[in-house]
Amino acid sequence: MIAVLQKASVTLAVGGWNEGSANYSEMAADQKKRSSFIASAIETIKKHDFDGFDLDWEFPTKRGGRPEDRENFIALLKDLRAALKPHGYILTAAISAGIETLKSGYKLKEVGDLLDYVHLMCYDYRGSWDSTTGANSPLGPVTDPLTVKSSVSFVLANGIPARKLVLGLPTYGRTFILETPPAEGEKRNLGERSKTGAGFQGPFTRTDGFMGYNELCLELKSSNWTVYWDDASSTPFAVNGDKVISFDNAKSIQLKVSDLLGD
């Protein structure tokens, strides 16, 4: 592990889901604001001796963004690349795995050319915002647009080099509340009707529809949960009364990685 960590790059990551898109959309549209943003990033990288910069704009053209974000995202990456290269810093970005967002928000060939690595966020395909239970990070099938296989196939077909692709996989669960609790001993399946927007919280993260892996491990040990395996998505899920958790374990992570490396 020490040898692995010594070779690892530690980068400054800026953005995330909670920040939304509006501020990044405004910044990327203005050359002076881009320059100010980049100067601040480089100052922080130098101060803390980071190895580079990771942009996590979630997402261009979405969540308060504008149609021009697709072009402006490339302009921002070009400016970042030009500013970081003389220092030897690496440049990466986290991008959506949703096909529609990939189409509207990114010129993927140029993104692949400009970045050292592309972090594809292969999670949150399903959650308590849906009207049925589903897998947080389903492997396949490739014909379903809401799967890891379809996302990876799309970005590879549209210009992201395989050698630059980093698969982002979840170490947390998505929670649901069933409309109809199961009878005692009745087997449940993913895809059953659930209450929209009614996922339950973990005791520490306290976020509806979300459960951290630490919370998940404690919950499965301390409560009366039954764990099932969903063949369609190649992921586990757990049921306790009207509560359902979709999550990943060592088996499902290994299946995703080995399957995609095989492709």
Image: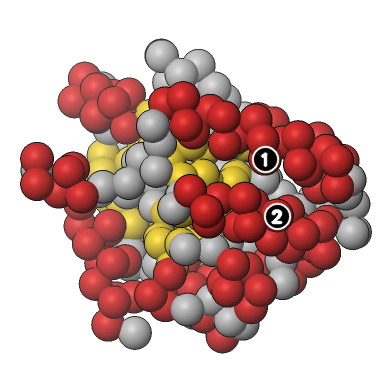
Q: CA distance from mark 1 to mark 2?
A: 8 Å
Residue 229 in picture, x, y percent from top left: 28, 56
The foreground one among 174 and 222 is: 174
For the point 66% across and 74% down, the residue is 110
The foreground one among 170 and 105 is: 105
Q: Which of the marked residues, 1 or 2, is nearer the chain's N terminus?
A: 1
Work out whether residue 101 can be spotted. Answer: no
The foreground one among 128 and 151 is: 151
Q: Residues within 10 Å of mark 1 (few under 14, many from 20)?
A: some
Label 1 is placed on what type of residue? Answer: Ile
Q: Residues within 10 Å of mark 2 (few under 14, many from 20)?
A: some
Residue 173 in picture, x, y percent from top left: 41, 38
Could you tell me if the residues under marks 1 and 2 are in contact, i.e. CB atoms within 8 Å?
Answer: yes
Label 2 is placed on what type of residue? Answer: Asp
Q: Residue 162, located in which quarter of the rendered image?
A: bottom left
Query: In the image, which disc is placed on residue 29?
Result: none
For the point 39% across and 52% down, the residue is 169
Q: Secondary structure at mark 1?
A: helix
For the point 41% across and 14% down, the residue is 204
Q: Which residue is mark 2?
A: 79
Residue 66 in picture, x, y percent from top left: 90, 52
Identify whether 215 is placed above or below 63. above
Q: Residue 234, located in which quarter of the rendered image?
A: bottom left
Work out whether residue 207 can be spotted. Answer: yes
Q: Which residue is mark 1?
A: 38
Instruction: Locate residue 159 relative to residue 181 in the image: left or right.
Output: right
Residue 235 in picture, x, y percent from top left: 33, 57
Instruction: Locate residue 232 relative to residue 57 in the image: left or right.
Output: left
Q: Secondary structure at mark 2?
A: helix
